[in-house]
Image: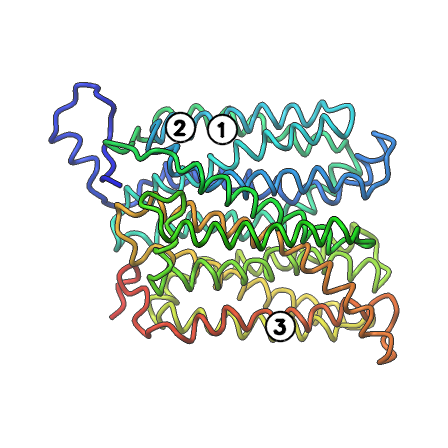
Amino acid sequence: MKPARDGSGDGRSPDRRTKQRTPGSVRRPLALLVAASYFMEIFDSTVIAPAAPHIAADFGIPAVGVNVAITAYVLTLAVLIPTSGWLADRFGTRRVFMTAIALFTLASASCAVAVNLPMLTGARVLQGIGGAMMVPVGRLVVLRSTAKPELVKAIAYLTWPALVAPVFAPTVGGLLSTYATWRWIFLINVPLGIVGLLVAVRVVPDARAAEPARLDRWGVTLSAVGIAALVVGMEGLGAPSPEWPLVVTALALAVTALTCAVLYLLRARSPLLDLRILRIKTYRAAAIGGSVFRAVISSAIPFLLALFFQIGFGWTAARAGLVVMALFLGNVLIKPATTPLMRRFGIRTMMIVSVLASAACLVGIAFLQPRTPLPVLLAVLLANGIFRSVGLTTYNTLAFADVEAERMSHANPLFATLQELGAGLGVAVGALLVRLGGQVAAPFGMGAADGPFRVAFILLVVVLAIPLVEALLLARTAGAAVTGRT
């Protein structure tokens, strides 16, 4: 892959193009625009869940049937994100980014006027197509235009949506669907998308590769089939009543296709996803360990907490949603301190602390009772939000610390794909652990309503061993290039 260049034969001088290509300080308007698009994507992946009963009532279908609209969105994102780097190199970052925003906005409006489940599902697929291009390409522009010492500031902007949206979206979705209409959860994207397009014209550079590589069709096919089968299989495995023939077939196909994809991508000259980037220790720890951390902290915990409080404690949906907002408060309170903490103690140290502290918070959540004083309960959730924020920031900051600028087109989509898989599969894993928890809780005399959730929280602690091991294997100076710490 040759270095990216700005412009497309527009007559500008070579000096001008060279100056624009050189990474420099953080371009705040650009970073904020990409962060806003990231918020829209994550918001729409989680906002529909609490509105499912209301959507089902309008369509005259069981509430569980709306799950196909959720899965369609996540599945489309996971399958198409790997092509984002190639599209940016081939057609230019500005054109692809603006096309993605326009498509996402139009799809959101289509969701709002859907009259049946097939129409809603189709519109969600279009949303996924837009999201698959929008966020990875936007982040690629920021990474390419920012110098290593300034990268920690840029990542700070891009981390906010991942901290806020998964906790904020369920509350908004529940309130809008209860007191207004579920259609508003999609309509709010329309004005945001229009503003984003107007801003993108001015702040997004038109960068592209001088000689873009040909699209790796075998890589696209094998990766798409494997990822799609994995998502379908895990969603089916986490369902209340799994359809075992479908689950077994999907997971078997996933293992076969993904194995073939890995073997092919490691040998291909110009692969769709350059898995050799995983040889960079810091990138591997952030991409693999960070995706597992995200699956547990950003997806499974918020999903399980809302159900735990409603089913286990007998709370209303409104009360449960408001209490879970303590996670969001923890994110906000600690965010200004995350960068100074990384510079003071190092990324590796803060990563280990965040994983261990998050595990401790999970144990604390597992022992909460309906009679637990509200201040104590809120303190546990607040602490979980604090270490969630620290962990996500460290992983996002570390990911590209040692990746050369010319390899960003491969590193960025691979990282985004693993992130989306982690976020998408987190809920399915959480649901699966609850079902396993039901089988464990009964013999130990735990409550039929809250026992399965308590077991699931403990099992999530075990899952966090993966990012912990990845962090422990890092050098103490990991990420020093972006934090400035020696």
Task: From the viewer's perspective, tell me whether residue 392 is left or right of residue 407.
Answer: right
Q: Which residue is mark 2?
A: 200
Task: Provide the secondary structure element on which disc 1 rests.
Answer: helix
On residue 461, which mark appears? Answer: 3
* Picture quarter with the N terminus: top left
- The one nearer the camera, 393 or 372, is 393
Q: Residue furthest top?
A: 11
Q: Residue furthest bottom?
A: 444
Task: From the viewer's perspective, tell me whether residue 104 is left or right of residue 30.
Answer: right
Task: Provide the secondary structure element on which disc 2 rests.
Answer: helix
- Residue 213 in the image: state x and y as whole percent: 31, 35
- The one nearer the camera, 100 or 216, is 216
Q: Earlier in the sequence, mark 2 or mark 1?
A: 1
**Is the C-beta separation of discs 2 and 1 under 8 Å?**
yes
Q: Within 10 Å of the Cα at label 1, are there few (<14), some (14-19), or many (20+) other Cα atoms?
A: many
Q: Earlier in the sequence, mark 1 or mark 3?
A: 1
* Label 2 to label 1: alpha-carbon separation: 9 Å
* Label 1 to label 3: alpha-carbon separation: 37 Å
- Residue 389 in the image: state x and y as whole percent: 51, 60
Look at label 2 and name its amino acid: Ala
Q: Earlier in the sequence, mark 3 or mark 2?
A: 2
- Residue 420 in the image: state x and y as whole percent: 54, 48
Q: Quadrant of residue 398?
A: bottom left
Look at label 1 and name its amino acid: Ile
Task: From the viewer's perspective, tell me whether residue 115 is left or right of residue 152.
Answer: right
Q: Within 10 Å of the Cα at label 2, are there few (<14), some (14-19), or many (20+) other Cα atoms?
A: many
Of tags 2 and 1, the one toward the viewer is 1
**Is the C-beta separation of discs 3 and 2 under 8 Å?**
no
Q: Which residue is mark 1?
A: 101
Residue at the location (40% across, 38% down)?
Answer: 216
Task: From the viewer's perspective, tell me whether residue 163 is left or right of residue 85.
Answer: right
